[in-house]
Image: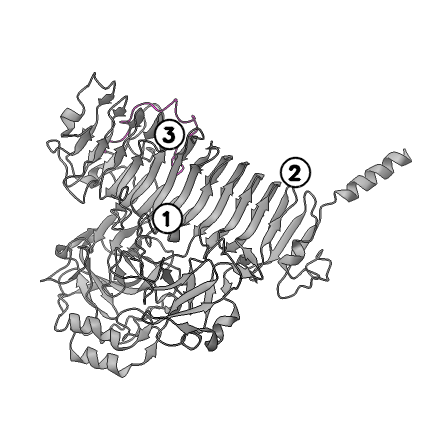
């Protein structure tokens, strides 16, 4: 008996569960780490410890670790996983590889000027052959684009290194950099995504390799010359409540190499890449980024309730040399307003390692250029997703860049996609097709296509290029550019009206029927902001049976139980969603100065005030409004008015303009709205501190619980008066820049104000071009718009 108790005692101690604490400011690596009062200091110390099942490693909140890779080398068990998390209160602990370049760059004698205009070079690392060449660089906290060679065509009208494409790293350790004078004197700080030092390259902020049963919780994982989180040959890995991928170079998180069974939820994947970058087959390797890569040899991942912002691919599940199957991707939000070429999700593979059985549902994908969802795989189930605002990409990588909702390829490298199901999706505002199908044997039904094919009459709403064994049934289409007589449906090479599209064709073994064009007011059919259905909408309970495709307890994105036998058309169930008692406006507007290729730059990001700036003359809006944090997509503050006639202002409120042109409410970051106002018809007036004000061309009906869209960017006629806006190079429209004194006209007085502020830096009215610095370049918009006046009546 004594022997048994002794063995039991030894066993308990061998596998005792410890809590270890790590604090950058209060710790010491000589401490035990076993209490908050005696924490370790460094990640290097953590990497030396052998952890047991059930152990917890906790990093202190509000602290930051720079330049150390955290390695998870030991496994937990299913019942006793190893936890890596945080302690204390405040912001998530930051673990980042984003750091300063080696200090040698600060030595002016190490730089040499090249024969190219304002281009300098320096040997940062010697005797190296870099396996991960830095592709992201921050100069005085502002990120700039790279290029591929000193004479490379950047596909934006520039070549090689210049003021916008400011740098280039070479594998041999050379850095080429743009600067008007010696970079050691011109710049104060140079930062990159990872660590290259002493023949050591840190590609990952967190490495999880050859382990199992690990939970990563409440950490902010940034940087990495490859990714922030790398998972290789590891099973039962969970990530929750984390920020992932800020400033990372290629991936936010990359999973492969036999990694099976994982969960990722309540996480934010944000690249912080806010630059418009042309993309073609020669440059895609330079700048392409992936929020979450589920690649060769991984399966059974559940990805839900996350947000993906500004990645070339939000999620890419690709099988190049091994499988990637049985994933569930649901209840996420994807958006890429800053990217010139991007997709929410791409799923594909190479035979014989095709991807199968991936379920994509209840996601919200919006503001992309190219496609929202691209499929080159089999047995994919994409349903109850909301897809909105997909525009044509202007980049040179244009084979697939035409602004559609869902795209199914015909196959690559011996892959023949088939047996894919697309049902109950709502697709709104696409430049091109709602669906483009190149592969056989797809099932497409109960989808709602709204205002698609807007870029050209040559685009159909729905294109079925491969006509074999297709099942296309009971899809509803509606739009201002569509009626039942228009040939906006493509079958094979033929453009057809809806009646002929629905005709049976025995030669192709396809079943195409009961697709409908609705010739009614869109708002009588569906709310295009909240995506809910009015009680009298013909889309309610109009779908075909989906009982065999979703479980009986399946709920839509809003948590409403779906009627499987008689489902609605589109993504939402038939339950009613309680709306707030206010007036919601999805407003969109561009400013001329920061605009380029569909988005506005965020150069002022680090200088924007947290308090609204319109409490001074001439606006004198005294209501205190502030934000707790300036987010990465903020452009500037606006002052919004509602007028009940041409000159009488009834209501005012400040707002935030984002880089996509969307105007949001400062308090919650959601769609802009006015609260507690009388229902009525109002002109909407937009004021900005150094652009000419604009006003809606007609009064807009604003009522309680009725959501509206108003987009100033798509037509000159959206604003009141004679040519009230500037037409941009891509055909969009923006508020004219250059009204420094905000008196409604651009003239010599504005010119003088700029001259008086040279030189200047920061958030200043005279910085008309939004590049943070006041200099002679700020005369550009004043000269361009000289003698223009606002068309808003006084």
Please state which of the two labelled residues, at mark 1 or mark 2, is closer to the viewer: 1
For mark 2, give the secondary structure.
loop
Residue to which mark 2 is pinned? 77
Q: Position of residue 281 (x, y in %)?
A: 32, 47
Decide if residue 347 is on the left or right side of residue 539. Answer: right
* Residue at the spot 58% in from the left edge and 39% down from the top edge: 234
Determine the main secondary structure of the stretch shown in magenta.
loop
Q: Which residues are magenta?
A: 537-563
Residue to which mark 3 is pinned? 415
Give the farthest residue toward the top: 506
**Mark 3, other Cα within 10 Å: few <14 / some 14–19 / many ≥20:** many
Q: Position of residue 750 (x, y in %)?
A: 20, 77
Foreground of the two, 762 or 289: 289
Do the residues bearing badges 1 and 2 touch, measured as CB atoms within 8 Å? Answer: no
Residue to which mark 1 is pinned? 312
* Residue at the spot 25% in from the left edge and 79% down from the top edge: 754
Give the farthest residue toward the left: 722
Distance between the Cα atoms at labels 3 and 2?
A: 38 Å
Q: How is the image coloured?
A: one colour
Distance between the Cα atoms at labels 3 and 1?
A: 23 Å
Q: Is residue 224 above or below residue 118?
A: above
Quadrant location, the C terminus: bottom left
Does the magenta-highlighted stretch encompass residue 661? no
Foreground of the two, 709 or 323: 323
């Amino acid at each position: 008996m004594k022997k048994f108790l002794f063995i039991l005692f030894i066993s308990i101690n061998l596998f005792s569960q410890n809590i270890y604490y790590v604090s950058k400011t209060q710790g010491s690596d000589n401490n035990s780490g076993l209490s908050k009062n005696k924490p370790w200091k460094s990640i290097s110390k953590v990497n030396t410890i052998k952890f047991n099942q059930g152990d917890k490693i906790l990093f202190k909140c509000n602290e930051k670790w720079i330049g150390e890779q955290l390695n998870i080398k030991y496994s937990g068990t299913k019942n006793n996983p190893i936890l890596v998390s945080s302690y204390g209160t405040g912001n998530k602990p930051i673990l980042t590889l984003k750091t300063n370049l080696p200090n040698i760059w600060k030595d002016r004698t190490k730089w040499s000027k090249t024969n190219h205009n304002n281009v300098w070079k320096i040997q940062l690392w010697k005797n190296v052959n870099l396996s991960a060449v830095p592709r992201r660089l921050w100069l005085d906290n502002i990120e700039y684009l790279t290029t591929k060679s000193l004479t490379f065509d950047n596909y934006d009208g520039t070549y090689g290194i210049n003021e916008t494409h400011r740098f280039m790293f070479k594998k041999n350790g050379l850095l080429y950099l743009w600067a008007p004078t010696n970079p050691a004197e011109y710049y104060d700080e140079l930062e990159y995504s990872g660590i290259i030092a002493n023949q050591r390259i840190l590609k990952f902020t967190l490495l999880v390799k050859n382990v199992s049963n690990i939970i990563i919780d409440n950490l902010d994982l940034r940087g990495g010359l490859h990714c922030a989180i790398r998972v290789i040959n590891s099973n039962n890995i969970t990530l929750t409540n984390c920020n992932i991928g800020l400033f990372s170079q290629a991936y936010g998180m990359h999973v492969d190499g036999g990694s099976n069974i994982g969960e990722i939820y309540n996480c934010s994947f944000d690249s912080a890449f806010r630059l418009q970058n042309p993309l073609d087959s020669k440059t895609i390797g330079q700048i392409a980024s992936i929020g979450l890569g589920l690649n060769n040899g991984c399966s059974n991942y559940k990805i839900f309730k996350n947000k993906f912002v500004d990645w070339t691919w939000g999620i890419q599940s690709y099988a190049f040399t091994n499988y990637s199957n049985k994933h569930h991707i649901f209840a996420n939000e994807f958006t890429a307003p800053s990217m010139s070429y991007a997709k929410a999700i791409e799923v594909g593979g190479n035979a014989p390692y095709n991807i199968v059985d991936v379920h994509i549902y209840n996601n919200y994908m919006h503001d992309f250029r190219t496609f929202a969802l691209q499929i080159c795989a089999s047995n994919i189930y994409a349903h109850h997703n909301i897809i909105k605002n997909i525009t044509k990409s202007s980049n040179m990588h244009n084979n697939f860049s035409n602004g559609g909702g869902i795209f199914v390829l015909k196959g690559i490298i011996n892959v023949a996609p088939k047996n894919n199901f697309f049902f109950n999706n709502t697709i709104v505002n696409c430049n091109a097709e709602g669906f483009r199908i190149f592969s056989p044997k797809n099932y497409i039904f109960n989808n709602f296509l709204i205002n698609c094919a807007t870029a050209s009459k040559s685009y159909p709403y729905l294109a079925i290029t491969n006509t074999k064994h297709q099942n296309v049934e009971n899809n509803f289409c509606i739009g201002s550019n569509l009626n039942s007589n228009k040939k906006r449906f493509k079958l094979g090479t033929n453009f057809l009206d809806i009646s002929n599209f629905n005709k049976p064709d025995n030669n192709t073994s396809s079943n195409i029927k009961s697709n409908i064009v609705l010739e009614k007011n869109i708002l009588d059919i569906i709310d295009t902001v909240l995506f809910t259905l009015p009680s009298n909408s013909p889309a309610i309970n109009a779908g075909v049976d989906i009982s065999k495709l979703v479980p009986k307890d399946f709920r839509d994105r809003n948590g409403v139980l779906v009627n499987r036998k008689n489902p609605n058309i589109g993504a939402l169930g038939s339950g009613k969603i309680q709306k707030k008692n206010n007036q919601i406006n999805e407003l969109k507007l561009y400013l001329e100065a920061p605009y380029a290729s569909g988005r506005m730059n965020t150069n002022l990001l680090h200088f924007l005030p947290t308090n609204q700036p319109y409490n001074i003359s001439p606006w004198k809006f005294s209501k205190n409004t502030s934000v707790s944090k300036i987010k990465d997509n903020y452009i500037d503050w606006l002052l919004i008015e509602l007028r009940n006639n041409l000159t009488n202002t009834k209501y005012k409120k400040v707002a935030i303009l984002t880089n996509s042109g969307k105007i949001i409410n400062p308090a919650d970051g959601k769609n802009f709205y006015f609260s507690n106002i009388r229902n009525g018809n109002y002109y909407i007036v937009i004021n900005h501190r150094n652009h000419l004000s604009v006003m809606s061309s007609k009064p807009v009906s604003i009522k309680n619980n009725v959501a509206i869209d108003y987009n100033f960017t798509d037509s000159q006629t959206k604003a009141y008066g004679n040519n009230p806006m500037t037409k941009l190079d891509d055909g969009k429209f923006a508020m004219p820049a250059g009204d420094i004194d905000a008196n409604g006209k651009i003239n010599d007085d504005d010119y003088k104000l700029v001259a008086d502020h040279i030189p200047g830096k920061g958030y200043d009215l005279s910085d008309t071009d939004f590049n943070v610095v006041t200099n002679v370049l700020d005369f550009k918009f004043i000269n361009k718009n000289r003698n223009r006046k606002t068309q808003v009546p006084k």
